[in-house]
Image (cartoon, rainbow, N blue to C red):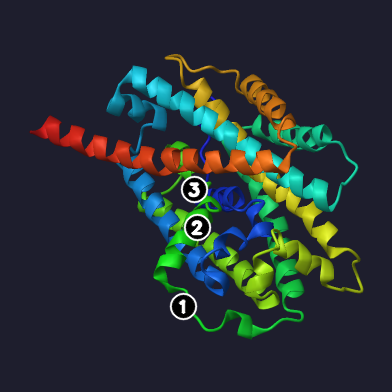
């Protein structure tokens, strides 16, 4: 069976990082500085801390059923009829994540690099690459993600080098003047940048380790690396731009890359955006994989045509993405997706954990 292949802790870390890191890196901290201004890095840090709390909830849920898949213990907690519905909603949620990532980055490509390329080509190429990879086993996908992580490191180095140009550290001062309320408000849009850790719901029983606590350590390390990276990007952007400029620049990192002059490479922003396409594709193919696995588990006898399911979901997502070329439509769609994300990756795991604890107490009592 395609889902029974185990992955290592290192592969789990790579999967989480490459899934969390997406198109947000180019827009941070535009949405995260609406109330905090130059204190946006605090909101980004709080968002990472909140993600860690949700990771702990998902870990506690998986630890209660260490040998069962998510679908198996889901049916035990809520019953099969409700479990099938939730399973289907999770499949739709993962497919929606694919669409959001693809159209968000296609929009950036279309506005900054490939001006004349038709929208259908941009989204079609992304889904084609993602579906081809997602047709593989979880272990194979993890191996690809390890290679993609190398590109992520290269991009991180580019960001650091280009961001240390002309700027002012005074843009970061004074620290904390906007208040804790503003920091918490801006941490809400920051949280969506960390989504991807919910993959633990599915992969928990397929991680090879001596003790289950190692999974929590691996997830925490991955989330910590992502948090550090986002905070670093936020500080670099704030170093380069004042609060007034942050209010108007939606993709500040692109401006930093564009104004940087390097004798070896011209148009560093184009080079970065091209390389970063591989990183965003990693997010898409993992969500495609998860969507197919959730669909396959809806029947009592699991559907074995994994590759076929992946391509069917990819075609479905591609058709929807073709109608999302309008930027305002993307923004509205993203707002709706953020609400759905909160329900699926925060409310649902928490409710399942509480339901599991209550069932356990009833069974003992």
Mark 1 against mark 3, which lies toward the viewer? 1
On residue 176, which mark appears? 1
Task: Examine the rendering and report whether any part of residue 3 can be seen.
Answer: no
User: Taking 126 as reference, is 27 left or right?
Assistant: left
Give the position of the C terminus as an image quadrant: top left
* Label 3 sits on residue: 197
User: Taking 291 as reference, is 84 left or right?
Assistant: left
Say whether disc 3 or disc 2 marks the residue closer to the N-terminus: 3
Q: Residues within 10 Å of mark 2 (few under 14, many from 20)?
A: many
Cα separation between marks 3 and 2: 8 Å
Residue at (36, 32) in percent of width and height = 68
User: Taking 81 as reference, is 198 left or right?
Assistant: right
Cα separation between marks 2 and 1: 24 Å
Task: Assign a secondary structure to mark 1.
Answer: loop
On residue 63, which mark appears? none
Task: Assign a secondary structure to mark 2.
Answer: helix
């Amino acid at each position: 069976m395609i889902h029974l292949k185990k992955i290592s802790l290192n592969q789990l870390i790579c999967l989480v990082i490459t899934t969390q890191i997406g198109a947000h890196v180019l827009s941070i901290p535009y949405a995260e500085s609406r109330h905090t201004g130059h204190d946006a890095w605090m909101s980004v840090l709080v968002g990472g801390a909140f993600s860690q709390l949700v990771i702990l909830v998902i870990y506690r849920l998986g630890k209660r059923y260490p040998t069962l898949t998510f679908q198996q213990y889901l049916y035990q907690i809520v019953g099969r009829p409700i479990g099938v519905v939730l399973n289907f909603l999770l499949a739709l949620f993962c497919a929606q994540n694919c669409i959001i990532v693809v159209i968000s980055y296609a929009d950036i490509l279309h506005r900054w690099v490939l001006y004349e390329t038709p929208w259908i080509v941009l989204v079609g190429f992304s889904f084609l690459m993602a579906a081809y990879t997602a047709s593989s086993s979880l272990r194979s996908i993890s191996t690809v993600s390890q290679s993609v992580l190398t590109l992520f490191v290269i991009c991180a180095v580019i960001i650091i080098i280009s961001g240390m140009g002309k700027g002012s550290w005074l843009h970061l001062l004074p620290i904390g003047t906007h208040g804790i309320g503003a920091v918490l408000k801006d941490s809400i849009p920051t949280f969506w940048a960390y989504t991807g850790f919910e993959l633990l719901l599915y992969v928990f029983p397929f991680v090879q380790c001596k003790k289950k606590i190692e999974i929590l350590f691996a997830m925490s390390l991955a989330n910590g690396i992502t948090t550090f990276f986002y905070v670093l990007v936020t500080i670099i952007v704030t170093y380069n731009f004042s609060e007034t400029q942050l209010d108007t620049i939606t993709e500040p990192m692109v401006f930093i890359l564009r104004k940087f002059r390097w004798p070896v490479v011209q148009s560093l922003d184009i080079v970065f955006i091209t390389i970063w396409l591989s990183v965003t594709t990693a997010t898409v193919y993992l969500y495609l994989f998860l969507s197919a696995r959730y669909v396959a588990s809806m029947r009592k006898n699991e559907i074995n045509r994994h590759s076929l399911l992946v391509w069917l979901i990819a075609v479905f997502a591609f058709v929807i993405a073709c109608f999302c070329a309008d930027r305002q439509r993307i923004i509205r769609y993203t707002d709706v997706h953020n609400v759905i994300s909160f329900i699926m990756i925060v409310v649902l795991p928490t409710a399942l954990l509480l339901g599991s604890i209550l069932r356990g107490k009833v069974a003992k009592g």
